[in-house]
Amino acid sequence: MAKDVIIALDMDSADRVVRFLDAFTLAKPFVKIGMELYYAEGPDIVRRIKDRGHRIFLDLKLHDIPNTVRKAMKVLSALDVDMTNVHAAGTRAMMEAALEGLERTGGHTDLIAVTQLTSTDEARMRKELLIDASMEETVLHYALNARDAGLAGVVCSPLESLRIHEACGEGFMTVTPGIRFADSAKGDQVRVMTPARARENASDYIVVGRPITEAEDPVAAYERCVREFLA
Ligand code: C5P
C-alpha cells in the first residue's frame, strides 16, 4: 500500500496556504484540508490546491443521519479529493450511506473513519459517553465496523496502528496524526510518536501539522519527515 506524509494545512485563509505551498518548488506534498480552512474559504480552496497538483485529504469528519450524510457526500464527491472521512460513531448504516453518496459520481476517493478522537481519554469515554469498554477495545470495534461497512481505513493514533492491521487486515489503511520529531515540542498532543516509530508501527499515512507548518524551514522539515517515515 502507498505510504506517505500528509501535511495538515491548519490555516484560516487561502493567502496563508498559498504562501506556504509556494515554498514547495520541487515536491507536491499530499495535504489535509480541515474544517477551519474549508469553512473559511469554501470548496474553492479545494479546487485551487488540487489545480496546483497536490493530493488532498478533506478532513470534515461528517456525522449525521445516513440520508443527510449520503447527500452531503454526493456533493463533496464533485471535488474528487483523494481521501475524506466520517465519524465511525455515526454507525455502520451512516458509513454505508456515506460510501454510497461518494460512489454515486464515480470518483476514486478513499473514505476513512475517525475512531475515537485522540482528545477523548478513557475516563471521559466512560464517564461522559457511558462507553463501558477500554479505549483499545472501542477503537478496534469501530475500526471493524468501518471495515465491514466497506470503508478503506481509519484515522487513529499511531499507537493503535499495528493492532488495527492485525484485526482488520493489511490492506485496511491507518492514517495517524500525533507525530512529532524526537527533538520538537508536543503542543497539545498527548500521545505522540516520531515518523520512524510510526513506520515501525505500520502507519500507512502520517498526518503532520505544526512540526512542519511552524518550522523555520517547512520544506526541510517536510523532507526530514519523509526521510524518517519512508526510510
Ligand atoms: O499540528 P499537529 O501535527 O498536532 O496536527 C495534527 C492534525 O491532525 C490536526 O489537523 C488535527 O486536527 C488532526 N487530528 C488529530 N487527532 C485526531 C484526528 C485529527 O490530531 N484524532
Image: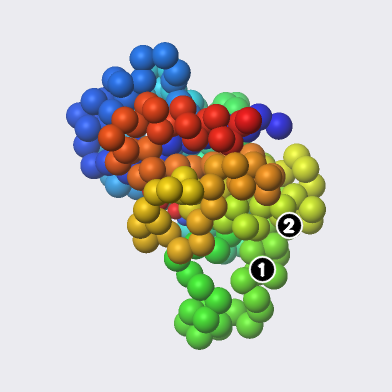
Work out whether residue 111 or residue 93 is closer to the camera in this orientation and state it.
Answer: 111
Q: Secondary structure at mark 1?
A: helix
Q: Is residue 6 above or below residue 141?
A: above
State left or right for residue 223 relative to residue 164. left
Q: What type is the residue that disc 1 sits on?
A: Glu
Residue drawn at the location 24% of the way across and 25% of the way down: 19
Residue drawn at the location 30% of the way across and 41% of the way down: 214
- First in sequence: mark 1 vs mark 2: 1
In which quadrant of the rendered image does the N terminus lie? top right
Q: Say whether residue 96 is visible.
A: no
Where does residue 65 sit, x and y in percent of width and height? Answer: 51, 59
Where does residue 215 sit, x and y in percent of width and height? Answer: 32, 38
Q: Is residue 44 above or below residue 194?
A: above
Work out whether residue 69 or residue 171 is closer to the camera in this orientation and state it.
Answer: 171
Furthest residue in direction top, as rendered: 26
Where does residue 90 sit, x and y in percent of width and height? Answer: 56, 61
Furthest residue in direction front, as rendered: 183
Quarter where residue 27 is shown: top left
- Residue 163's tag is 2
Q: Say whether residue 6 is visible.
A: yes
Residue drawn at the location 48% of the way across and 70% of the way down: 120
User: CA–CA distance between discs 1 and 2?
Assistant: 9 Å
- Residue 136's tag is 1
Where does residue 211 sit, x and y in percent of width and height? Answer: 38, 43
State left or right for residue 202 relative to residue 179. right
User: CB of mark 1 within 8 Å of CB of mark 2?
Assistant: yes
How many numbered circles are shown?
2
State left or right for residue 212 relative to residue 57. left
Work out whether residue 173 or residue 60 is closer to the camera in this orientation and state it.
Answer: 173
